[in-house]
Image: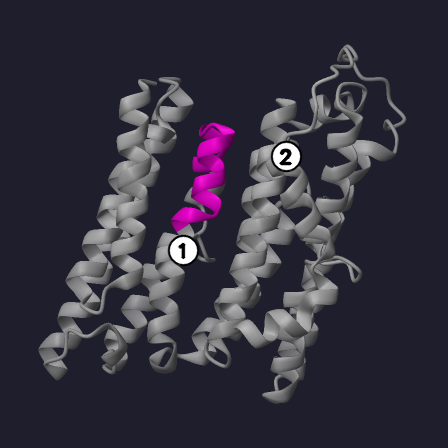
Amino acid sequence: MNPQAKLIFITSLLLGTTITISSNHWIMAWAGLEINTLAILPLISKSHHPRAIEAATKYFLVQAAASALVLFSSMTNAWCTGQWDITQLTHPTSCLILTSAIAMKLGLVPFHFWFPEVLQGSPLTTGLLLSTAMKLPPITLLYMTSPSLNPTLLTTMAILSTALGGWMGLNQTQIRKILAFSSISHLGWMAIILAYNPKLTLLNFYLYALMTTTVFLTMNSMKVLKLSTLMTAWTKVPSLNAMLLLTLLSLAGLPPLTGFLPKWLIIQELTKQDMAPAATIISLLSLLSLFFYLRLAYCTTITLPPHTTNHMKQWHTYKPTPTLIGILTTMSITLLPASPMILTLI
């Protein structure tokens, strides 16, 4: 892709995100979401492969429908209450429509079907943007409207997302699809706490974005797209593989690592809100995700599976590990002791 064109699209992404995050008026927020959608489409379809074109078409259709619903919900609210302010969303029907629209934008169950397909058809760098940067504006809108939203609906969607995200990722062999279902599962954790402590939703999103960025950049550096090539990648860059192992375990939420922090805080908050059954269910469902993270980690570094693979082992390259990946990995595995400081910041 032409560097100037790429610069324009990345600038538009930043502009759209900034407009949505900083706006108080629904029309401005909607305009920011539209700019974002239009800027990411060329980045999805830049390879001109039929799969990429299909992914871009699916993404456009879903995001256009979700944007129309955002506009419809804000107009309904303005019609009934006379308010265009984002924080003044008080009409119950508008709240339900907005929750559906944002769930569609994020890929929450039951509006999740597009996300794995779009991620599978995109390059790894675009997949990284779709999993992190493109989710920030919709989550900001949820954060601003959280007092008005229906907690029962959010909890139901959250538990279903964690269940389906874990369950459907079990038999995948394509790494981008596994990361898509991992994203759906993490969105469930963010949605369940939104109505009770929205700051924890943002904290969970920031830490999820940090860990996912590390995984995507490492995969991109190793040029790995499916499990069979991941099995032989340990001969190529052993240091990156070791980093990937730790980051995957952190993404799974295992205790001494950063990924445990949001899960721990969310379970604690749910228990305070007398929602111990929901906390128990979502904790048990996260074991499904743990299985496919462990499967990825197993294929990454520990050993080769019992059957022989047809893939040739790759030559060991003596390229130094990129500094950015090193910094992100360190943050992905060591932030748990800093949790008191993080909690004072949010």
- Secondary structure mostly seen in magenta is helix
Q: CA distance from mark 1 to mark 2?
A: 25 Å
Going 58% across and 88% down the picture, which residue do you hit? 273
Q: Judging from the image, what secondary structure is the residue with disc 1 in?
A: helix
Question: Sequence-wise, which precedes: disc 1 or disc 2?
Answer: 1
Which is nearer the eye, 272 or 242?
242
Please check the rendered image and state whether residue 237 is part of the magenta-colored stretch, yes or no: no
Whether 170 is drawn above or below 264: the answer is above
Going 76% across and 40% down the picture, which residue do you hit? 245
Q: Which residue is mark 1?
A: 136
Q: Position of residue 102 (x, y in %)?
A: 35, 60
Question: Identity of the amino acid at label 2?
Answer: Thr
Question: Identity of the amino acid at label 1?
Answer: Leu
Q: Is residue 160 visible?
A: no
Identify the disc placed on residue 12.
Answer: none
Numbered disc in front, either 1 or 2:
2
Q: Which residues are magenta?
A: 118-134
Q: Which residue is mark 2?
A: 323
Whether 183 is drawn above or below 271: the answer is above
Q: Position of residue 84 (x, y in %)?
A: 15, 73
Q: Is residue 50 visible?
A: yes
Please check the rendered image and state whether residue 123 is part of the magenta-colored stretch, yes or no: yes
Whether 246 is drawn above or below 273: the answer is above
